[in-house]
Amino acid sequence: MKKIDYVISGLPFLNFKENERDTIFQEIFKLLNGKFILFQYTKKDSF
């Protein structure tokens, strides 16, 4: 399979179980020949 140059993800990884996150990351890095860019919003209580 051809390697990919970029993965841009907005998946909320903190909402996944640890084993699900591990599987997703393993599969991404198997195919990746470049950069993995992750953005994520996390709820934070106000002060």
Image (cartoon, rainbow, N blue to C red):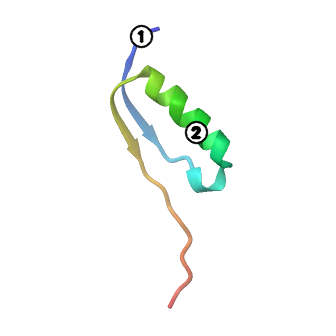
Front: mark 2 or 1:
2
- Residue occupying image coordinates x 50% and y 47%: 10
In the displayed structure, 16 sits above or below 4; it is: below
Circle number at residue 22: 2
In the displayed structure, 1 sits above or below 8; it is: above
CA gap between label 2 and label 1 equals: 22 Å
Coordinates of residue 36 in the picture (x, y in percent): 38, 37
Coordinates of residue 22 in the picture (x, y in percent): 58, 39
Neighbours of disc 1 within 10 Å: few (<14), some (14-19), many (20+)? few
Coordinates of residue 15 in the picture (x, y in percent): 65, 55
- Say which residue label 1 marks: 2
In the displayed structure, 28 sits above or below 38; it is: above
Dot 2 falls on a residue whose secondary structure is helix
- Residue occupying image coordinates x 66% and y 41%: 19
Dot 1 falls on a residue whose secondary structure is loop
Coordinates of residue 40 in the picture (x, y in percent): 48, 56
